[in-house]
Amino acid sequence: IVRVCGRECRTRTAVLKGKPFETAKAALRANLRHNHQPDEGHMRIGYARVSTSEQNIDLQIDALQAAGCNRIFEDHISGVKSDRPGLGEAFRALKPQDTLVVWRLDRLARSMRDLTDTIHSLHAREIGFHSICEHIDVGSAFGEFALHILSAVAHFERALIPARVRSTMSARS
């Protein structure tokens, strides 16, 4: 018996019996990740991403499960790619009053501008956002404040880029 999302989920022990613990754990995790249904009410949808197939996504999955995610979507693709199928599925699964949960901010967005645009899009759909490592939950006043600070820093950074380019070019002349 494994407890996920506050419910007990049973799996057939015959399928897992005699297999090494990590194999059984991975099989169970895959089963829960794709087939677990929430009790009722609002969902916490998790999104995990690694850039290459050599990277291990298990740490993110474990953290998202511990954060109470009802469903978890994942991508094994570079964050630079704008087409991330798992993220698209997560967005389609989200309904008003649900919360999107990520392990770290950089797992969700390619840049600060992309991050703030994504968060504002979620907010417009009445969807919450929570980042586990950065402790940002836009459902709280402090979380929204932290997001605005990050947005201001991103805007400032973008404004400095042209000046840096001009300085570099004049130094080379």
Image (cartoon, rainbow, N blue to C red):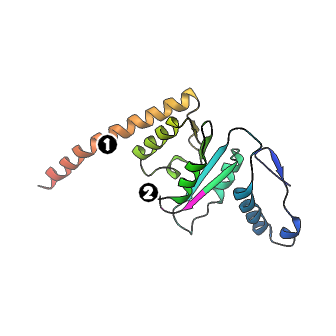
Question: Badge 2 is on which residue?
Answer: 82
The local crowd at label 1, few if under 14, some if 14 to 19, many if 20 or more residues have their Cα within 10 Å, is few
Cα distance in 3D space between marks 2 and 1 = 20 Å
Q: Which mark is residue 158?
A: 1
Q: Amino acid at mark 1?
A: Arg
- Residue at 45% across, 44% down: 115
Q: Which mark is residue 81?
A: none
Q: Amino acid at mark 2?
A: Ser
* Quadrant (top left, top right, bottom left, bottom right) of the N terminus: bottom right
Where does residue 74 sit, x and y in percent of width and height? 59, 58
Q: Nearer the viewer, residue 79 or 132?
A: 79
Residue range in magenta is 74-79
Where does residue 119 sit, x and y in percent of width and height? 49, 40
Q: Secondary structure at mark 2?
A: loop
From the image, state whether disc 2 or disc 1 is nearer to you: 2
Q: Nearer the viewer, residue 131 or 119?
A: 119
- Residue at 39% across, 37% down: 153
Where does residue 108 sit, x and y in percent of width and height? 51, 50
Return the disc, 2 or 1, that comes first in the chain's sequence: 2
Q: Is residue 164 shown to the viewer in this render?
A: yes
Question: Is 77 a magenta residue?
Answer: yes
Q: Secondary structure at mark 1?
A: helix
Image-quadrant location for residue 150: top left
Q: Nearer the viewer, residue 22 or 119?
A: 119
- Residue at 49% across, 29% down: 145
Question: Is 50 a magenta residue?
Answer: no
- Residue at 84% across, 49% down: 8
Number of numbered tags placed on the structure image: 2
Residue at far bottom of view: 18
Q: Nearer the viewer, residue 67 or 45?
A: 45
